[in-house]
Image (cartoon, rainbow, N blue to C red):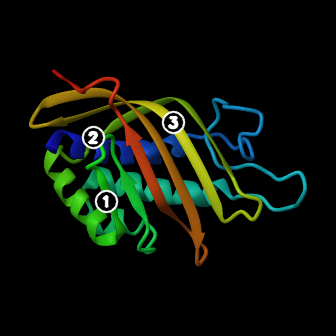
């Protein structure tokens, strides 16, 4: 369970990294199938509305920094206050719903890595947004690395997330990761 919580933490870091390095071009709703671009930043050909990718990047960058710094309050500020906000891991028992449970999961995750050691590279990513520009999604396959007391771990993860614009700011409303296909390697 401790190892999975660490992986959850790192997945969250990776989710933020997926868009931090994204270009300005993405697909609207992946209607043409998966792409190698990060999301969300699509334009809707039927309207002038455009999801501001810089605004979404801002929440991802904030989460990334808070996670790497092990700043619990700053991490939680990136999540929606909606009581149905959820973080899911690989197994059925890895489900955290609402601010209190998500905060508890991060509290445990912070015990499993040293600050400043999280690294990720997402070699496939995609995403899109709704027509109103208030909901967006992303998906990625990433390689990750961290360390605890000088012991480095490397692993691959699948990550999906949904962000929603609330009161002018983007927040995670769901985050899911899976690493069942390959356990982390400790060096």
Gap between marks 1 and 3 measured at Cα: 21 Å
Disc marking residue 96: 1
Sequence-wise first label, 2 or 1? 2
Gap between marks 3 and 2 measured at Cα: 15 Å
The x, y position of residue 71, in whole percent, is 27, 62
Gap between marks 2 and 1 measured at Cα: 14 Å
Residue holding disc 3: 140
Sequence-wise first label, 1 or 3? 1
Disc marking residue 7: 2
The x, y position of residue 159, in whole percent, is 45, 40
Q: Quadrant of residue 147?
A: top left
The residue positioned farthest toward the left in the image shown:
149
The residue positioned farthest toward the bottom in the image shown:
167
Which secondary structure lies at badge 1?
A: strand
Which secondary structure lies at badge 2?
A: helix
**CB atoms at circles 1 and 3 under 8 Å apart?**
no
């Amino acid at each position: 369970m401790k190892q999975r919580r660490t992986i959850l933490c790192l997945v969250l870091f990776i989710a933020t990294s997926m868009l931090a390095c994204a270009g300005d071009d993405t697909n609207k709703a992946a209607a043409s199938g998966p792409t190698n671009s990060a999301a969300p930043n699509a334009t809707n050909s039927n309207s002038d509305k455009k999801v501001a990718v810089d605004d979404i990047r801002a929440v991802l960058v904030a989460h990334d920094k808070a996670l790497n710094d092990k700043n619990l309050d700053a991490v939680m500020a990136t999540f929606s206050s909606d009581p149905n906000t959820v973080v899911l891991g690989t197994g059925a028992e890895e489900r955290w719903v609402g601010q209190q449970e998500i905060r508890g999961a991060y509290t445990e995750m912070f015990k499993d890595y040293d600050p400043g050691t999280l690294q990720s590279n997402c070699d496939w990513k995609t995403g899109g947004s709704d027509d109103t520009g208030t909901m967006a999604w992303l998906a990625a396959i990433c390689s990750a690395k961290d360390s605890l007391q000088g012991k480095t771990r490397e692993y691959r993860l699948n990550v999906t997330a949904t962000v929603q614009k609330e009161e002018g700011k983007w927040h995670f409303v769901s985050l899911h990761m899976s690493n069942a296909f390959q356990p982390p390697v400790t060096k």
